Amino acid sequence: MNLTKQTKLTLVYIGLAFLFSVAIRMIWIYQFNGYEPFIFNNQFMINTNDGYYFAEGARDILSGVSQSNDRSPLTSATSILTAFFVKLLPFSFESVILYMPVFLSSLIVIPIILIAKNLQNLEMGFIAALVGSVAWSYYNRTMVGYYDTDMLNVVLPTFLLWSIIWAVNTNEDKYLLITALDILVYRWWYPASYSLEFAFIGMIVLYTLLWDRKNLYNYKLLALMLFAMMNLDGSIRLVMVLGVFYIFKQEKFNKYIYYILGLSIAAFLLTGGLSPIWAKLQGYIFARGSSALGENMALHFYSVVQTVREAGKIPFETFANRISGHPITFVLSLVGYVWLVLKHRVMLFALPLLGLGFLAYEGGLRFTVYAVPVMALSIAFLFTQSVEYLSDKKSVQRVLLTLLSLLVLLPNIYHIYGYRVPTVFKQDEVKVLEQLKSIASREDYVISWWDYGYPIRYYADVKTLVDGGKHSGGVNFPVSFILTNPQEVAAKMARLDVEYTQKRFLAKGNFASSNIAQMSKDYGYDDSNDFLTSLEMEIRLPQKTRDIYLYLPYRMMDIYPTVKVFSNLDLNSGVEYKRPLFYVTRNFKNNNGMVHLGNNISLNLKDSSISIGRSKQPLRRFTSTQYDQKGKLQVQEKLMNFNAQISVIYMKNYNTFLVVDEQTYNSTYIQMMALERYDEKLFEQVLLTPHVKVYKLKI
């Protein structure tokens, strides 16, 4: 095939694969077309919480307005690129953030096909592009509305893999620059890219030592990559990369290559190039389970990682499905990769992507996405090579390749069709936040669980205590305490935590490692547990500097036990207290006064008892709630046995039963959200809807 024809075919394959990737991602739009709860401002809302973080940054960049300490990501690449697209394109802000993942993630087809072109197998590239662009985990994290860094997090390292392969195979100077620029862009887009970049460096070193030690080109490549990876501002690194590249273009400087490489290594180390590795060692190898205050107090908090599903070990079938769509395809892809490496040694450079993807088996499902392009190339290579052995007729080969490709694509497309992810918030919830925006000041705080932090900040334009990026055990503890304790102590903690958060901003390092630790110190307690107990009595609260609102959504009902666990422990020892009773169900059956609630729990309305497993206990109270025709919540509470500890709440409009102990029943969340009962000395109503209840703190 002549060069012109090959280039045209490459462009055709890229165009077709790109359109296929985009079209598949439009299935979600087709499925929910006209579904009003997912639409706001005449457009679908996004379906990932973290997306609202970058949306907040883009919004503030465009408006030019941002308050101090609001955590708005004004310098984030995602926010900057979004703001650029909004200014450039004739579409609404909501449309841009909804569709950016569709088009940016579909760019993955370009490096996949270009890698295959270098290996002289364009058909392999086309098949791999189709498979890789819609593979299970890649689709999940780049679908329409999944507005997050993931839309380029795999595209950019795959481009890096392409440029390294072309550099080593061609020894052309332009690929030296392309590789370095790709690292600069990748680091700008995703600062955590360091580990993967370093792994690519390691593979090039290994490749050079084993097979190509006398090739000066490889040392030029390593030097430019190290300069691009230095721990300096991106503009400085860009200037250095361009300068060194200019030197490398002059043959007279070839005798200095080893010196320049040595300089790049020194510059890399001296600018803190190994700092990320050291940080990981501190975080994962060295003990770091407590935050200390002075010499005698150490506070222990619950780790967020323990509650994050995507950080845990996953079953092999899930692991294989997410990478290849089916375990059989996964195994065949492994065979294909081995064969591919045996025929094209440069594909060893794909090991960093493959290795990071395989870490998901132990480290959590989120990493599987990195293995997708490599495994897609591998299965495509296996197919293209196998059909050549089966038949030497091109027509037969094409038919076989089409059938095999369909067999691999169908499980992934079937998954996509059934993957009907909802938007983060529904329209009615967003309307509440829009109303709150007109009531609250930008300096006010809205307290809710960290899952809702980013959307609250985006729609209501307020501050929050916790969010998707600020949710360590130490900052989660006070919020958990507020939501799951009685209103009096919750109100005091709300004022304390907000004012201490503001103090922390101004302290410039002269502050304890957690607000709770600093509160304990300031109030004269050596034991933080004693300080928490003191909240039940009269204490002097900090001076009020801003208003505070509680945002209590019905959706938090399903994660209440997770919320509670962060404050349900002894701060001195880290030992978890006995977990309070909380059970929620929407699947129940009433059979002649016996209500079966599932999980071997039954409510006997005739004798006012509840059976949990084999244990039958008297019921303390039965409470029912229902909205009347005017939209006002009516609560009926029947006390049955004052000495009992278990109560049942039936929320008729929600078709929900709650089984709780006395501690949970009296919590701020249950009293104020489920029952709309609040202490008028401490709170006032602001916005009450079936989906969300908002209260303002008075103290």
Image (tube, rainbow, N blue to C red):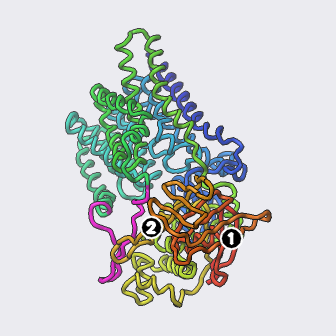
Q: Residue at 38% x, 38% y: name it.
A: 161
Label 2 vs 1, first from the N-terminus: 2
Report whether 128 appears left or right of 432: left
Report whether 533 appears left or right of 63: left
- Secondary structure of residue under mark 1: strand
Residue 353 location (% of width, % of height)? 36, 41
Q: Inspect the magenta stretch and tell me whether residue 300 lies in it.
A: yes
- Evaluate whether residue 60 shows in this view: no
Residue flagged by tag 1: what amino acid is it?
Answer: Gln
Residue bearing the label numbered 2: 565
- Residue 367 lies, with reference to residue 557, above or below; the image says above
Front-most of 54 and 378?
378
Front-most of 678 and 411?
678
- Evaluate whether residue 642 shows in this view: yes
- Residue 505 lies, with reference to residue 472, above or below; the image says below
Residue 442 location (% of width, % of height)? 63, 71
Residue 636, disc: 1
- Secondary structure of residue under mark 2: helix
Please give the range of residues in magenta: 283-308
Report crowding for label 1: few under 14, some 14 to 19, many 20 or more residues within 10 A (C-alpha): few
Front-most of 444 and 60?
444
